[in-house]
Image (cartoon, rainbow, N blue to C red):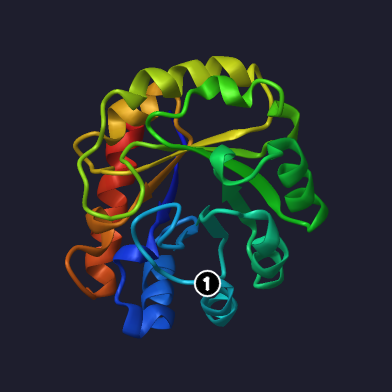
């Protein structure tokens, strides 16, 4: 694996300093900025909405990678597109018509992603592959940061890689990603790694710390 996308999750950033935190991780070499949106219904946590996404968009010079852990998702797709999302990923369980939802995301000018929980089989992607730009494999049960990586998801990543069959679709992995497991995740077929605590630690850090953490992940994944 020669290239890997590093997408720090701002769920682990200092929420009182999001603009500063985003500037720091981008200066430190990240490729995307991952935004976890949780509704306290689909997942047992409540985070941010389109208003915050709109507020941080001017600070993001790379890619705003928005993961919607909300149900229903359809009524809010335009709001997040208008807030400046580049990628919008939704869960198959978050609406009745996945094909339609993905088409709406693309019609709004965004890249369309599908996020799979650990227990969600990749077979749900079979008939929508030509609507997808990104497949997000959750390697923890969504809702909270700081969980341990589920190795059961490695074979799923490999099966998804085969399903893609040359299509221009990225595989992203989120949950418990660290320098210790980045190599096997990338080796299974991942193109992008989401990391929260592995980059941000337990609070706001200096840019040099973020740079070292991002470099450690990238080096481990590509070595």
Q: Position of residue 76 (x, y in %)?
A: 66, 63
At x 55%, y 14%, the residue is 162
Q: Is residue 192 left or right of residue 83?
A: left
Circle 1 residue? 49
Q: Is residue 7 above or below residue 162?
A: below
Q: Is residue 116 above or below residue 161?
A: below
Q: Is residue 143 left or right of residue 72?
A: left
At x 29%, y 30%, the residue is 183
Query: In the orientation shown, which residue stands out farthest toward the right?
Result: 107
At x 44%, y 24%, the residue is 157
Q: Secondary structure at mark 1?
A: loop
**Closer to us: 183 or 119:** 119
In this rendering, the count of numbered labels is 1
Q: Position of residue 179 (x, y in %)?
A: 23, 41
Quadrant in which the N terminus appears: top left
At x 30%, y 62%, the residue is 211
- Residue 4, by quadrant, is top left
**Closer to us: 64 or 50:** 50
Crowd tier of the residue under label 1, counting other residues whose Cα lies within 10 Å: few below 14, some 14–19, many 20 or above: some
**Closer to us: 102 or 13:** 102
Q: Position of residue 209 (x, y in %)?
A: 22, 66
Quadrant in which the C terminus appears: top left
Q: Is residue 165 left or right of residue 116?
A: right
Q: Is residue 208 above or below residue 126?
A: below
**Closer to us: 123 or 60:** 123
Q: Position of residue 48 (x, y in %)?
A: 46, 71
């Amino acid at each position: 694996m020669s290239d890997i996308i590093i997408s720090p999750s701002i769920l682990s950033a200092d929420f009182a300093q999001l603009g500063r935190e985003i500037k720091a991780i981008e200066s430190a070499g990240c490729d995307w900025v991952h935004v976890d949106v949780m509704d306290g219904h689909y997942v047992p946590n409540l985070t941010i909405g389109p208003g915050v996404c709109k507020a941080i968009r001017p600070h993001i010079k790379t890619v705003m990678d928005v993961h919607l852990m909300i149900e229903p998702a359809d009524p809010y797709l335009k709001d997040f597109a208008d807030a400046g999302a580049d990628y919008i990923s939704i869960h198959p369980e978050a609406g009745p018509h996945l094909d339609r939802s993905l088409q709406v995301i693309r019609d709004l000018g965004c890249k369309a992603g599908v996020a799979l929980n650990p227990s969600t089989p990749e077979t749900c992607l079979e008939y929508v592959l030509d609507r997808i730009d990104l497949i997000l494999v959750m390697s923890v049960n969504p809702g909270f940061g700081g969980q341990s990586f589920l190795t059961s998801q490695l074979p799923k990543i490999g099966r998804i890689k085969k399903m893609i069959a040359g299509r221009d679709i990225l595989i992203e992995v989120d949950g418990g990603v660290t320098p210790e497991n980045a190599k096997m995740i990338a080796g299974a077929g991942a193109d992008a790694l989401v990391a929260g605590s592995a980059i941000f630690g337990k609070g706001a850090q200096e840019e040099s710390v973020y740079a070292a953490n991002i470099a450690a992940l990238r080096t481990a994944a590509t070595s």
